[in-house]
Image (spheres, helix red, strand yellow):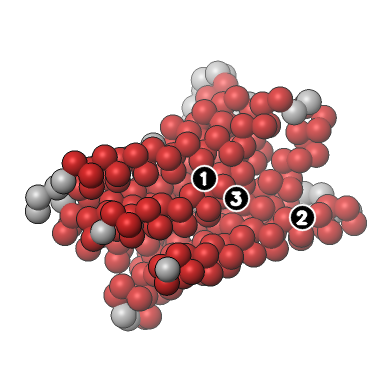
Amino acid sequence: MNLSFEIVTGAIGAGFLVSLMSFSGLFVIWLPAQRLAIVVPYLVALAVGVLLGDAFIHLIPDAISRHGSVSDICLTVLAGLFLFFVLEKLVRWRHDHNVDTSVAAEILPLAKMNLIGDAIHNFVDGILIAGSFLVDPALGLTTTLAIVAHEIPQELGDVGALLRGGFSPRQAVMFNFYCSLTVLLGVVFTLLLSQIAQSSLILLLPIAAGGFIYIAASDLIPVLHERSNLAHVSGQSVAFALGIVFMQFIVVFEQTLLAV
């Protein structure tokens, strides 16, 4: 396939724009410690809603529309759940056997799992961006806008999860940005090997969905149950619901863009 300068620069520029959305949570750097301690649980609740909403409203339906077999996609989602279960076992094993007392050793497994899941999801976003630019640069722009829209609430939730997992505010923002750069890897991978990249979405989309479901249910929801007074129940429930609403809004927004 002959790649024009417009396609290459457009796809890479779009990927970089999406990666910059990781700085949506930059405000946490300037929040006082007491205020940050209040905000973090609500950001974690938002992350739960966004992760589950993205999995059930966006990733799984997208995978089914590409593959056609609901049962195959569901099995792959379960494979993703199992894969992340094994990954967390390995992460926890390393964490428990690490005698180093540095800051890195104090980072909880839930933060590391969130980074892994987000890296896979960003890589998938890169494939979607570059794939749409290969079809039509105009479609690439609309796809990028849709991804940017859903990245903002997701990155806010990711920063909250990293803070809860032991990162300092500055570390949480920077590691979230480093993780977002896998968008560019997905873009380059697709530009070089477009057919293989597009075919891999049938596996990567449901695996990412399984990872998101696992992280939300296994790592983040238990954190929300650590405190359960009336303020936490109501506030976290609203944040959880908002995450789902954001994801549903993005689906409607994507459909509107594609219809234009």
| Type of amino acid under label 1 | Asn
The residue wearing badge 3 is 153
Of residues 115 and 186, the one drawn nearer to the viewer in this rendering: 186
Q: Nearer the viewer, mark 3 or mark 1?
A: 3
Residue at 18% from the left image edge and 55% from the top image edge? 194
Q: Amino acid at mark 3?
A: Pro
Say few, some or many: other residues with alpha carbon within 10 Å of mark 1 (under 14 / 14 to 19 / 20 or more).
many
The CA span between labels 2 and 1 is 19 Å
Of 38 and 96, the residue lying toward us: 38
**In the rendering, at what x and y percent does residue 165 appear?**
62, 37
Q: Amino acid at mark 2?
A: Gln
Given contact means CB atoms under 8 Å apart, are the residues at marks 3 and 1 in contact? no
Horizontal arrangement in the rendering, residue 125 relative to residue 188 (left or right)? right
Marks 2,1: beta carbons within 8 A: no
8 lies above or below 233: above
**Residues under labels 2 and 3: Cα distance?**
15 Å
Q: Which residue is mark 1?
A: 114
Q: Secondary structure at mark 2?
A: helix
Q: Residues within 10 Å of mark 2 (few under 14, many from 20)?
A: many
Which of the two residues, 43 or 71, is positioned nearer the viewer here? 43
Q: For the point 46% across and 70% down, which residue is it?
A: 255
- The reply to whether the C-beta atoms of the residues labelled 2 and 3 are less than 8 Å apart is no
Question: Does residue 234 appear in the picture of this structure?
Answer: yes
Left or right: residue 107 versus residue 197 is right
**Mark 2 or mark 1, earlier in chain:** 1
Residue located 30% across and 44% down the image: 10
Badge number at residue 236: 2
